[in-house]
Image: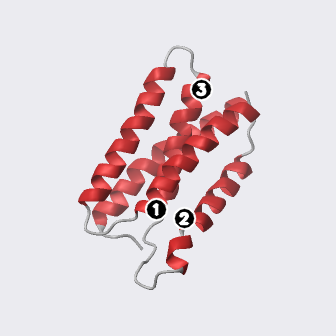
Amino acid sequence: MHDGWNHFIGNCLFIIPASLMIENLCRKTGCPILLIFVIMIIHSFISIIPIWFNDDMTVCGMSGNALMLLEMAFVWFGMRSEKFGKVWFTAAIIELIITIYTDKMAASNYKFGLIFGLAFGALCGFGLHSLFA
């Protein structure tokens, strides 16, 4: 299902801390975890749209969902934190830079899903903070 072990391990490095962070935020704010799953499903459907129109493309691992969750967590934590807000927003920007750079260097690229995941994650982080502040 993944584009090699590096891709799989990279996804785990994103999804494990992101899941723990989102779970913590949901517990603290009262956000239903089901809402996070709905957001993930919406992201999954939107990020595979280019595959519907291109026979040469494939979906491999849905890395965009992992990145989306981490970006969402960074932004949401940034909005909630008075002391460390800038640190969380810096982490979100660093994630963006690393993702774009490593995807550019990879043999396969999943740009639409990854970039959409980062943007959608940031938007959802802001939105969830507004809904559950």
- Residue linked to disc 2: 47
- Residue linked to disc 3: 79
Q: Considering depth in this image, is 94 or 1 the residue closer to the camera?
A: 94
Comparing marks 1 and 3, which lies closer to the viewer? Answer: 1
Q: At x 42% / y 71%, what residue is drawn?
A: 60
For marks 2 and 1 on the same chain, the one whose residue lies earlier in the sequence: 2
Residue 49 located left or right of residue 113: right
The amino acid on which the numbered mark 2 sits, given as a three-letter code, is: Ser
Crowd rating for badge 2 (residues with CA inside 10 Å; few <14, some 14–19, many 20+): many
Task: Specify the quadrant that holds the N terminus.
Answer: bottom left
The amino acid on which the numbered mark 3 sits, given as a three-letter code, is: Met
Q: At x 40% / y 65%, what residue is drawn?
A: 110
Marks 2 & 1, CB-CB < 8 Å contact: yes
Label 2: state its secondary structure. helix
Q: Residue furthest bottom?
A: 55
Q: Considering depth in this image, is 16 or 2 the residue closer to the camera?
A: 2
The amino acid on which the numbered mark 1 sits, given as a three-letter code, is: Phe
Which colour assignment does the render follow?
secondary structure
For marks 2 and 3 on the same chain, the one whose residue lies earlier in the sequence: 2
Residue 132: % across, % down: 74, 32
Per the model, the C-alpha gap separating discs 1 and 3 is 26 Å
- Residue linked to disc 1: 112
